[in-house]
Image (tube, grey):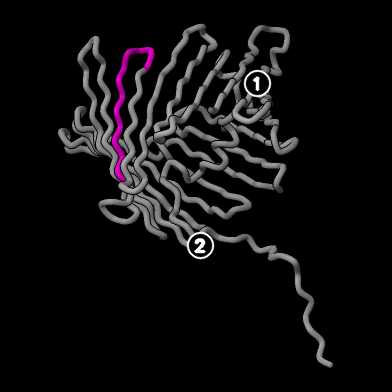
Amino acid sequence: MSSSQPTTMFSTQPTTMSFPPPAFSDIAKASNDLITRDFYHTARANVEVKTKAPNGVSFNVKGKSSQEGSTTGSIEGKYVNAPSGLTLTQAWTTTNILNTKIELDNQIAKGMKAEVAADFAPPSKDIGAKLNLSFKQPSFHIRAFLDLMKGPTANIDAVVGREGFLVGAEAGYDVQKAAITRYAAAVGYTVPQYSTAITASNNLSVFSAAYYHKVNSEVEAGAKATWDSKGSNNVGLEVAGKYRLDPTSFAKAKVNERGILSLAYNVLLRSGVTVGAGISLDTQKLNESAHKMGAHFEFNG
């Protein structure tokens, strides 16, 4: 009787991505989201109400009270026609700006998305118009952002990917001046369990290295280091973690090199109602009023 080799229940090798690479701005998205999102101390209070009408039109009302005391908000309506790939979004802000965006997805060509965005300020009669294009395939992702009213100017970025490895670049161009106004580059490696990225922005003068690790279904960890070659020799560092307490709640924490500790808690109270609370503490000035607190309320109907 021949013997057989033992088998394992699952592979321990990380699975590389088999989908289009991310946009240039999203090469370090996993670590950036972990470090920046769902920390509610940045505003005293933040309210968001989302509803959807029977005809498929969705509405989103936002309101925010900043730590400085100012209050801002917006109301947005979105209509999506899936068969035609057409999306129409209109918004009106408390600063009296009217925004309109028309998107056409996968109609010109498979993987291509075209977007026209316009904004209008009634008091000053100022008008802005932008044309945004993106095209993604299994091995590359290209985007172009054209500001038709200023310059005009163009910002173009591209990312190529293979077996989890990513290489991207970005450049800005002023058509009227016929000059490159900005450029950046990035490399990264992404698999479902973890990702790393190194970026050089601000004309290759600001360097950052980011790392994200999904330890298991409950724990996530990440860090980001930043160095400005034209500034001081100090390196900025942020370390963050997320722990899912149960299926309806999670807690987050982060700390930077200046000793600023941020804590956050998010819980789904019931279907459609989410509450978040956060606090930021300056651990080097615990006796001073340098701390910030905030709350977030989200309602989905």
Q: Nearer the viewer, residue 105 or 164?
A: 105
Query: Looking at the figure, which quarter contains the N terminus?
Result: bottom right
Numbered label attached to residue 163? 2
- Residue 291: say if magenta: no
What residue sits 56% from the left and 31% below the top? 37
| Three-letter amino acid code of the residue under disc 1 | Gly
Q: Nearer the viewer, residue 22 or 108?
A: 108
Quarter of the image where one finds residue 94 = top left
For the stretch drawn in magenta, the main secondary structure is strand
The residue segment tinted magenta is: 93-104
Direction from residue 268 to residue 32 in the image, left or right: left
- Tag 1 residue: 278
User: Looking at the picture, does residue 275 appear above or below residue 67?
Assistant: below
Q: Position of residue 2 (x, y in %)?
A: 81, 91
| Three-letter amino acid code of the residue under disc 2 | Glu
Direction from residue 139 to residue 238 in the image, left or right: right
Q: Residue furthest bottom?
A: 1
Q: Is residue 172 visible?
A: no
Q: Nearer the viewer, residue 126 or 169?
A: 126
Q: Residue furthest right?
A: 1
Quarter of the image where one finds residue 10 = bottom right
Q: Residue furthest left?
A: 176
Q: Position of residue 168 (x, y in %)?
A: 40, 50
